[in-house]
Amino acid sequence: MWLTIYYIFCYLIFTYTLALIVTYVIMVFLSRRTRQKLEINMPDDNTIKFLLRGSPLTPAVSVIAPAYNEEVVIIDCVNSLLQLDYPDYEVVIVNDESTDRTMEILIEEYKLIEVPYDIAMRVQSKPIKRVLKSTDERYSRLVVVDKVHGGTKADGSNAGINVCSNKYFVCTDVDCVIEPMALYRMMWHVVNSPAPMIGVGATMLMSNGCTVQDGRMIKAEVSNRPLPMFQQLEYMRSFLISKLGWSAINALPNISGGFGLFDTDIAVKSGGYDPASFAEDVDMLLRMVTYMKNHDLDFRLAMVPEACCWTEGPGTVKQLFRQRTRWARGLFEIVSNHRKLFFNPHYGPIGALTMPYIFIFEFLAPILEMLGFLFMLWLTPTGGVNWRSAFVVFCMIYLFCLFISTAVIYNDYKIKAVNWSSKRMNYLKLMVASILEPFVYHPFQTVCSNIGYLRFIRNTRAVWTPIQRQGFKKKDQ
């Protein structure tokens, strides 16, 4: 009996691994297809700017950034947002009753005063105490919302949606530095879509190790520190392979909460962000897709491959552990709350392909990896492991991981997603990270995922703990 279980498990893992490799190869080719299509249909930044700036039909955008205890980075964030190159937009900063000097810094720096404001509570959020605007004409685009503490970014984002006045909104984080052309790049997909564009994602990368001055990215570099280096590679793989690939078949499963554009009306009709969710960005997009499909409405989702946003990631193991266990809980929520989409062609390619992929290859993967590791530990003392075969299989998987990393770097090179300060040095750092990742970073991720799953199953009380910001490197004067 045990021998039968052993063989079944081995064949199961082999089949699963082979299927995973095939799906990754498909993603590489789909991302290549998207890249080639964009090379043909999407003009350069100057042309996009010329066409959209001169058109009266270019939609206005509200940029929403919730803030809680962000005194270290708040000025860089607001300056970055106020310097965006776009004809008609507003910046909505939502202070979630910070306990540090975030609000005081905003008032002092931007000369804010309380103003009367017509607020329609279109989506659920904690009460808004006051709305402030600047007395300085230079900051006329800035709106600051001071609200009762909600405890989650989703609640702050919903308060921003209740205040914003434009057809589209962009949700971002206050630790983010936005590229000046970001809104133009995203809006190009909206105005040129054959069907209503309900969401546009953009490539986000790590700002750790980069140099920022007055809210502008001055020098883009891969950090020399191991944790941000691994995360940079992970982000590039997610955006330049996975998300770019899914967008080729209109099956994008997630528009990052760190920087994404949404149709305000559809987001409101879908209920906005769920304040109780730990995966509020995925959850809202899936509810928007569900709403469109249930009402037989055509729609499109798109991805911008160029780096539009830089975010500060966890710099310590403790912070990274908190973030990734929270993400794992969020993934479990998505699998549980949106299970009606699984293998359901009524919801298009997202229901028929993306959601089954998420369940089989993202949700189950950490569980199977942990079981496989424990199985190896059990077999080793009994001599049940064929080490020669195990070594060959490991080498094949390892080489495939290197292939994916090489594809990521090649995509970045072809798309010119990032204007690296030194391509050779930064690509070398990324290759070093890809060599070490399977031995160091990936096992850590697997442990975090399984702990996050256990906490979800046990219904352990979770607290949304913001990352301790270190701020950005400044350009030498």
Image: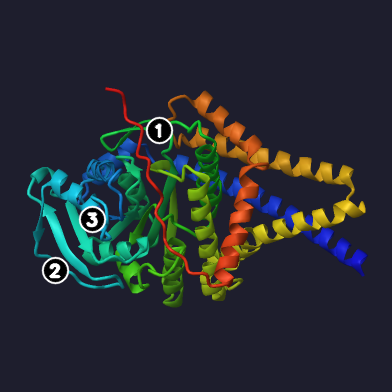
- Helix, strand or loop at label 3? It is strand
Q: Are marks 3 and 1 in contact (CB under 8 Å)?
A: no
- Helix, strand or loop at label 1? It is loop
Q: Residues within 10 Å of mark 2 (few under 14, many from 20)?
A: few
In the picture, the disc for residue 20 is none
Q: Residue furthest top?
A: 477
Q: How is the image coloured?
A: rainbow
Name the residue at 55% across, 60% down.
Answer: 328
- Helix, strand or loop at label 2? It is loop
Which kind of residue does numbered mark 3 sit on? Val
Q: Quadrant of residue 82?
A: top left
Q: Are marks 1 and 2 in contact (CB under 8 Å)?
A: no
Q: Residues within 10 Å of mark 1 (few under 14, many from 20)?
A: many
Residue 464 horizontal/vertical position (percent):
42, 61
Which kind of residue does numbered mark 1 sit on? Cys
Residue bearing the label numbered 1: 210
Residue 384 showing in the rendered view: no
Quadrant containing the N terminus in the rendered view: bottom right
Residue bearing the label numbered 3: 92
Q: Quadrant of residue 453?
A: bottom right
Residue 234 horizontal/vertical position (percent):
55, 44
